Amino acid sequence: MKAANSLVYVLVFTAFLICPAGLALGVVLHPGSEPNLVTWTDRPPDDVVGRWYYVASCVAVSSNCVITTRHQGLHANLFVEIAGKQYPVSQVWDHNTADLRVAKLYGANLANFVDIYTNIGEVGKNIVISGYGDGRGELLQQQGITYGYQWDNTNNTTLRFGTNRVDRISNNSNLDGIISNVIIADFDGLGDDISTTYEGITAAHDSGSGWFIKVAGIWEVAGLSRTVQVHYEAGHEDDPNYIIYEQSWFRDSNDPNILSPDYFDAVRLKSYADWIYQTIPPRMPGELTGDEWVDFADLAVFVSFWLDTDCHSPDWCLGADFEPDGDVDFADFAQFACYWLQD
């Protein structure tokens, strides 16, 4: 299943715009429930979520690799932006059936990244969802009652986080010919008995963003956002020529007294964890800057951690703790010297 290929830059049109299941392309949040990202600390670090080019999102899973969906295609001058810094994408590996991609970033040595959630039973678990892209726009109202929101449809430069809960699992979900195992959640109304604190749903440019579950105090990524439910103009239900994409509902538009939450889903990473870990390329010892060459730039990183005794998983002082045993000392320097000026 693993098929490494050098990245060929091609321009691809946006995919799945006519798919009835919809395209998970930001996080839409209810008014009054938007989290303060400064004070809300019980969530993954900002810099484990990246912006994939101008069209989607991604999640860091090693010091120089991210995962994302593959339905957004490849683009000219492809890059990933994490914590305000852009990294060229040097190589990609696409899963041969699932909507899943591993990408290597040139020049990256990321301090924060996450493991794949592989525990049994995502259903019923609280999740933190994330992504770059559209947030909440104008209210959608009927009979003076709000039943949903437009998407703001501005840009995909803002990172948003929200919460939800996994409701169910579906295997072999076919979306425009790409078959994936998925986990599914619903967008419940604020204050409903089953809604979460920062209830949210994905929107435009959120494809490839993470659904995170905390395990023993550590955040792991359980899914990558894939699709959201679509709506149709009145009188044209199920007609793909009358699809309304840029809306999120939690009530019925005809009778907003009736709860009718939109569903959205994510590629279930537990199903593909082995493939992801087998595909992530090993990193050469001593190569600490992501440029695939051990030189003075790497030495500068190594020296910055010299005699540090607080190295720990997953990054082990950005890789300077080679053994790893929690500190950077002469044993690590001896290993570093073995790879000097190698590429």
Image (spheres, helix red, strand yellow):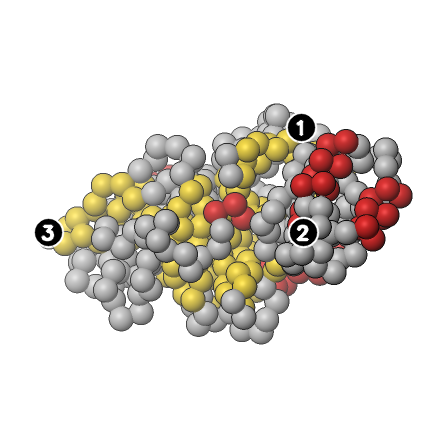
Q: Which of 184 and 329 is in front in this view?
A: 329
- Quadrant the C terminus occupies: top right
- Tell me which numbered mark, 1 or 3, is placed earlier along the sequence: 1
Residue mark closest to the camera, 3 vs 2: 2
SS at badge 2: loop
Look at the image and tell me whether residue 244 can be seen. Answer: no
- Circle 1 residues within 10 Å: few <14, some 14–19, many ≥20: few
Q: Mark 1 points at which residue?
A: 9
SS at badge 1: loop
Q: Where is residue 37 in the image (x, y as percent from the top left)?
A: 37, 49
Q: In which quarter of the image is residue 154?
A: top left
Kindly check if marks 1 and 3 are in contact, taking CB atoms under 8 A apart as contact: no
Q: Is residue 72 left or right of residue 19?
A: right
Q: Where is residue 36 in the image (x, y as percent from the top left)?
A: 32, 50
Q: Mark 3 points at which residue?
A: 144
Q: Name the residue under label 2.
A: 308
Amino acid type at mark 1:
Tyr
Identify which residue is drawn at 67% across, 51% down: 308
* C-alpha distance separating marks 3 and 2: 61 Å
Amino acid type at mark 3:
Gly
Identify which residue is drawn at 44% across, 72% down: 124
Amino acid type at mark 2:
Asp
* C-alpha distance separating marks 1 and 3: 50 Å
SS at badge 3: loop
Q: Position of residue 88 (x, y in %)?
A: 64, 31
For the view shown, which residue lies furthest in the left direction? 144
Q: How many marks?
A: 3
- Circle 2 residues within 10 Å: few <14, some 14–19, many ≥20: some
Identify which residue is drawn at 61% across, 67% down: 118
Q: Which of 71 and 91 is in front in this view?
A: 91
